[in-house]
Amino acid sequence: MKRKFGWLGLMLALVMAVTACGGGGNKTPESPSASQAAESASPSATSSDLKAKITFLNSKGEIQAQLEEAAKTFSNDYPGVTVEILSTSSGQSPFEKASQMYAAGNPATILMLDPADVPKFKDRILDLSGEKWVADAIDNSLTKADGTVLDFPFAVEGFSLVYNKKVLDAAVGGSFDPATIQTRSDLKALFDKIEASGKKAIHVSPMDWSLGAHYMNFLYADQSSDYAQVEKFISDLKAGSVDLASNTVFNGLIDTFDLMKEYNITKDNPLSPPYEKGPEYLAKGDVGLWFMGNWAWPNIKSFDATGEYGFLPVPISDNAADYGNTQIATAVTKRLTIDKEKSTPEQQAAAKKFLEWLVYEQNGQDFLVNKANIIPAFKNITLEPQDPLAKSVKSYMSNGATVVGMTSMPADHWSKVGASMQKYMANAGDRAKLAEEIEDYWKTVK
C-alpha cells in the first residue's frame, strides 16, 4: 500500500505512544480533559437516538468470541443498536471477503481490513476526518488520501519468537534472561539446552501468512535502521536489480530459519500442523519457543492462563551489534473502515458510535485491552495490558528495540512469498530457488 507516511515514522510513533501514556509531550492535539473523559465513560444522553442493525466484518479470527461479546455489551450500552459479527473464511484474506461482499451488494457496515487494502476501497468508505478519536490516534497511524482519513487504527501488534519462561528457566537452570539471546549462536545454544532438559526447542507454524507476512518481514525491515534504505531495497527488488543470493540479511535470515527447521517439533511433517497446535505446544510446555505474535495470547491463555511468556528477537547473525538481532517487529496491523456505498445514515451513525465507544468508554476500552488483549493505537487509553505478550511488546517499544512491521506490503505478498517459504520449509526447493521465487514475485509488483 502506498501510504502517506514512512514505515520508520510509524515505528517512531509507536514508541512515542508508550511515553505518551506516561504523560510525555507531543505536538498532536491534546486528549480530552478529565471532565470530558468522565462524561464519555458512560453512554451519552443521545444514545436512545441510535436505532440500527449493523454488521462488522472481523478478519482477526482469534478474537471472534471476544468481539461477539463486545457486540452484546455495546448493544446493552446502546439498546437501539444491534451489532452482528461476521468473519472471513479460513485462508481467505479480508480483501477477498470484502470484495465478495461488495460484489454481492451487501458489504459489512464496518470492515476490518489489512493496511494495504484500505486505499483499494477509498471510494466506497466514509471519510472519518471529523471523528473525535482522530486527535487521539498515535502519530502517523491513520491512512489518509486526498486530505481525508480513511480508517480507524485498531491494533498495535508485535511478532517474533514467543517463549514459555517456565520451560526456559528449567533449561538454563535458573531465571531465564531474554537479554542473553543476541546472536544466532546464542539461540542455538538455547535450543540445545531446551532439548537437553527433555523438551523440544521450537514449533514453527506453517501457515503462509505467518511465513510470508511475518517471518519474511525481517528480510525487508532488517536491511537498515534507515527507512530510506529499506525503501530503496524494495524499489530495487521491483526493478529486478537485487541479487538475494548475495544479500547478507537474506542469507542470515534463512540461516536462522534453517536452524528453526532443524529443531522444529514437527520437522518430519512440517506443513501439517494447524495454527491451533502452536499455542498448545507452547502452553503445555512441549516446546520452549514458537514464532508468532502477541495476538496469540488468547489461544495460549486457553491452555495456560497464569504462565509467564515473552518475546525474543530473531537473530540473523553472530554479531550482536547487527541491526535486527535485538529487536522485534511492531506495527498497526488491522484497520476499521465504514461503508458508505450501501449503509444507511442510521447505520453509519451507529458504526461511528461503535468506534468512539472503543476509544472513550470504559466498556470499549476494557474490550480492547483486557478482553481482546490488544495494544490500542490511541494516546488517551491508559489501561495497561495485563497479558504477558502485550507487556513484552510494550517493553521493546519503550526501549526503542523494534523494527518495522511491513504493513504496506502488496496484498498478495503473504500468500505468494508464504507459498515459497512453505516449499522451502518442506525441502521442496533449495535456497537458490527460494531467492529466485522472491525476486520473480517482486518483478510483478507495480
Image: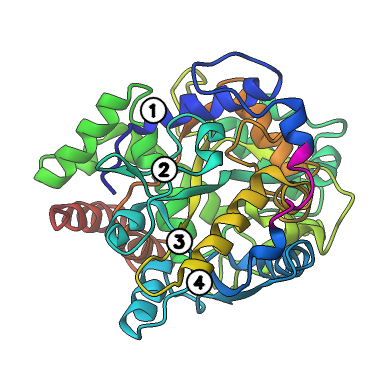
Residue, x 53% and y 35% (percent of image)?
A: 137
Up-down relation of residue 348 to residue 309 (above or below)? below
The location of residue 389, given as percent across then percent down, is 71, 43
The percent coordinates of residue 354 (x first, y second) are 62, 58
* Residue at position x 62%, y 30% in the image: 379
In primary-sequence order, the first of circles 4 and 2 is 2
Mark yes or no: residue 186 visible. Answer: yes
Q: Residue furthest top?
A: 25
Q: Residue under circle 4?
A: 271
| Secondary element type, mark 2 | loop
Precedes in sequence: disc 1 or disc 2:
1
Question: What type is the residue that disc 4 sits on?
Answer: Leu
* Residue type of the residue flagged with mark 1: Leu
- Tell whether label 4 touches label 3 (CB within 8 Å): no
Callout 3: 10 Å neighbours few (<14), some, many (20+)? many
Q: CA distance from mark 4 to mark 1?
A: 34 Å
Q: Which residues are magenta?
A: 39-46
Query: Is the residue 436 above or below the residue 323 in the image?
Result: below
Distance, label 4 to label 2, CA atoms, is 44 Å
Inspect the image, locate mark 3, and give the three-letter code of the amino acid beneath it: Ile
Q: Earlier in the sequence, mark 4 or mark 1?
A: 1
Question: Residue under circle 1?
Answer: 8
Is 40 colored magenta in this rendering? Answer: yes
Q: Are marks 4 and 1 in contact (CB under 8 Å)?
A: no
Closest to the camera, between mark 4 and mark 1, is 1
Tag nearer the camera, 4 or 2: 2
Q: Are marks 4 and 2 in contact (CB under 8 Å)?
A: no
Residue at 48% in and 17% down: 321
Mark 3 element type: strand
First in sequence: mark 3 vs mark 4: 4
Mark on residue 129? Answer: 2
